[in-house]
Image: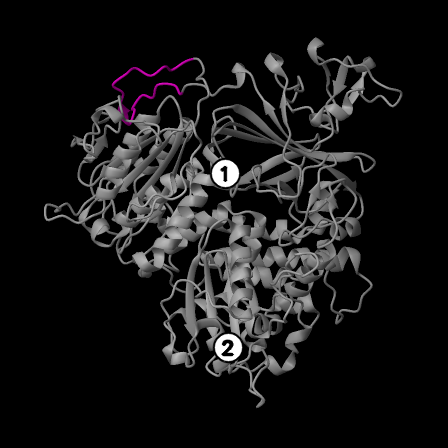
Amino acid sequence: MNPPSTPLSPIPQPPHSLRAAIDPQSIPSPIDTIEGDREQWEDQTYGTLPGGHVPLSTTDYVAIDQGNSSPKFLRISTWNIPSTSRLASDCRIPIAAVVQPFADQDPREEEIPVVDTGDIGPARCASCRGYINPWCKWVDGGMKWTCNMCTHETAVAPEYFCNLDANLTRLDHLQRPELNKGTVDFVVPEEYWAPHSPLRMEPLFQSVMPLPTSGRRQPQPMNYIFAFDVSLEAVQSGFTHSACSSLLDLLYSQSESGTEGHQGDSCLPAESKICIVTFDRTLHFYDLSVRLNLHLAPPIATLMAYLDDVFVPLRDGLFVDPQGSQPAITALLSTLGKPTTRMIDTEAALGTAIVACLASLAGTGGQVVVFTGVLPTIGLGALKTQVDESTLFGTDKENTLFAPRDNTWKDIAQQCAEEGIGVSMFLGMNRPIDVASVGIISSLTGGELYFHPRFDPPRDGIVLQSQLRRLLKRTTGYSCIMRVRCSSGLRVANHYGNFYESPTGDLLFGTLDADKAISVHLEHTKTLDDSMFAFVQSAVLYTTSHGQRRVRVCNLGLQVASLAGNVFRYADMDTVVCHMVREGISKLPTQRIAKIHEQLTDTCTAILLGYRKHCAASAAPSQLIIPEAFRALPVYTLAIMKTKPLKGRNVTADVRNYQAHKIMSMSVRCTMQHLYPQLLALHDLSDHVALPDPTTGQLRWPSTMRTSYIFMESYGLYLTDNEEMTVLWIGSDISPQLLKDLFDVDDILQLDPHITQFPHLPTRLSTQIRNILAHRHEQRGWTPKFMIARRNMDAAELEFSDMLVEDQNNAAMSYLDCAYTSTSFSQWFGY
């Protein structure tokens, strides 16, 4: 679309007295790097052998596994590890790795190979217990192999033996994926099955049937429990009804009117069973077996009113095949959530309900999905309404807002993690719900939190169903145990993410899915040989949703550098930024936000000054010297400080804790796009963008722009996305033709700001924008909340403005002013 013939000035901004001193275009920005990297890898594949530069996490690329795991599974802060702790200290780049073992792959990539070695299990080092991988060496004619991490020689099992060729390579090398692929799945024998949890001194529940406390449990398909809050407030808001309708549709592809859609299109594995529980002041269990389903009447509830003495009142019919019990499940979900005159309970015993789910899945493991809408003021973990939290920010008691107010919630979470149970929660409340307390259950079990304050069914119902679909359909393992190992000379110092760390140092996840990542901080224990490689190996022991016990192993061989220039040359800013934001958020329960800001600034300053001191010492003091890999580090550091968990101005504790939970488990890609949201100028799309190429059929996506009002026009149409919500900003001087092509209205005042999706119109612009949104949906796997922000008219403009991280917002300076006024930034830029 061409702009109007009369030139229009950029959107006016608050006065910045120092802005004239610096040209905004001269300050380093991530956009040039992101777009350049995307163009580089658009038409070529990435081979994972060490020695080259790795694509950015924000780039869509096809990786070929050549013995190293794809960066989608394992990224590290520098692909040339410093040889000594002294060199690492001089460079000041944190040695960190981010592991996302079940990350989604590009459809063009080869699937992860599955290796079954039978009863002998995967070959492992007798010393460090590392798994065999492409970097191991064979000795003694193939009778032994040398571990690449600890150099110990381990004998080969007779069933696994194979002769070597002249190059000391096994003759079956190409037929053994574990010897030539960086990422593999090993099918494991009985000794790897999940152990039964030991009997606790003070168990949270009573079991009707005695549970075994020794031995191991046989893997089985993952079972699901769906727990619905049926208290008065949750039902009246429409939250419970939307949740039930979404689940019903996903189970049977069935509309709310009862019309059947695509049969067999369930989101659950065919062998899985489900259970439905409801709760208010009491708990309600349902026998969903076919034998009791007469005349399509809803199943009769079995009540448990003793909230402090939890047990499961029935076993038969509690877990059922959703296809075999479709009539009973349909009748129940169609009834739940509908207001009745008998509804008087305003309280909901969330803690007791989760413990009841724990009791139901004890001994087997599985996944619990909870829908709740009120603060749990009754039952286990009962909470009182929080005092005015705004008085605590900036004080010594600020950190109390980021920790559970009742340790019962932490105890429940730990027991769930030990039992291999992941708990995900949809929060649809109208009042504060204390996410710091209830959310720790999802954080420690590897579950997910979904936040829908002031739930509005027309606005949020589509998002809830999309989130639930992603939750059920993505790759998910349960009863997971994870350990990250590294080669001799390095050690794992800290872990960051959503998990429960056992006393033995293993990371326990009730469930671990495709969207979850953890980060580890590595330290030197001795000098590394720069003529050798350094290694990192991640191993996740898990049960698939179809009931097979496996180990997902990710391997990485890294070059060792003795020069600071090589460390910086192959540094990975995406991983560094991901590590910085996680480390900062992890300190919220112990440190004040202002102190965390100082530490983030110091970290960024130290990295850039380390480069100037050790790689560009001869440059003039006034010369702009920034390492190529970290050109955008200052703006990302500023963006970290502007995130909702760490921003300076008052944000409710629930929002801070929810956002902290999300960021701590985000992939590197999602983290980068959350910190610096993508901003697209939709009014300036060329004719060939986001439309199929007539010859190849491929779609070319538009370039992004810098996130600042300085670069926007008042006649423009802009779309931004921070992985949480999508906002369309409409300028007050927008062309009527643009509105007509996109919304079929002529005047901006005629536009309904509450629409939740673009109308399907036969115009080129409408097709382009819907293609762009469909592409983002495919990348993410779900649809975020959509909002329209007309300039100076809609409240959504506040959310849009907060996403423009280069501007003055979120109680922090703009990137431009910060670069000039801050002592640290002045040092970075040479002013």
The Cα atoms of the two marked residues, 1 and 2, are separated by 41 Å
Q: Nearer the viewer, residue 123 or 531?
A: 123
Residue at 31% over, 33% down: 326
Label 1 belongs to which residue?
A: 513
Q: Is residue 198 above or below residue 341?
A: above
Instruction: Indicate the secondary structure of the residue bearing disc 2.
Output: helix
Look at the image and tell me in which quarter the N terminus lies: bottom right
- Residue range in magenta is 197-214
Q: Nearer the viewer, residue 619 or 71?
A: 71
Label 2 belongs to which residue?
A: 738
In the rendered structure, the answer to whether residue 79 lies left or right of residue 309 reads: right
Q: How many marks?
A: 2
* Dot 2 alpha-carbon crowd within 10 angstroms: few under 14, some 14 to 19, many 20 or more: many
- In magenta segment, residue 276: no
Dot 1 amino acid type: Asp
Dot 2 amino acid type: Leu
Q: Quadrant of residue 517?
A: top right
Majority secondary structure in the magenta region: loop
Residue at 35% over, 26% down: 361
Q: Position of residue 46 (x, y in %)?
A: 73, 46
Circles 1 and 2: CB atoms closer than 8 Å: no
Q: Is residue 242 shown to the viewer in this render?
A: yes
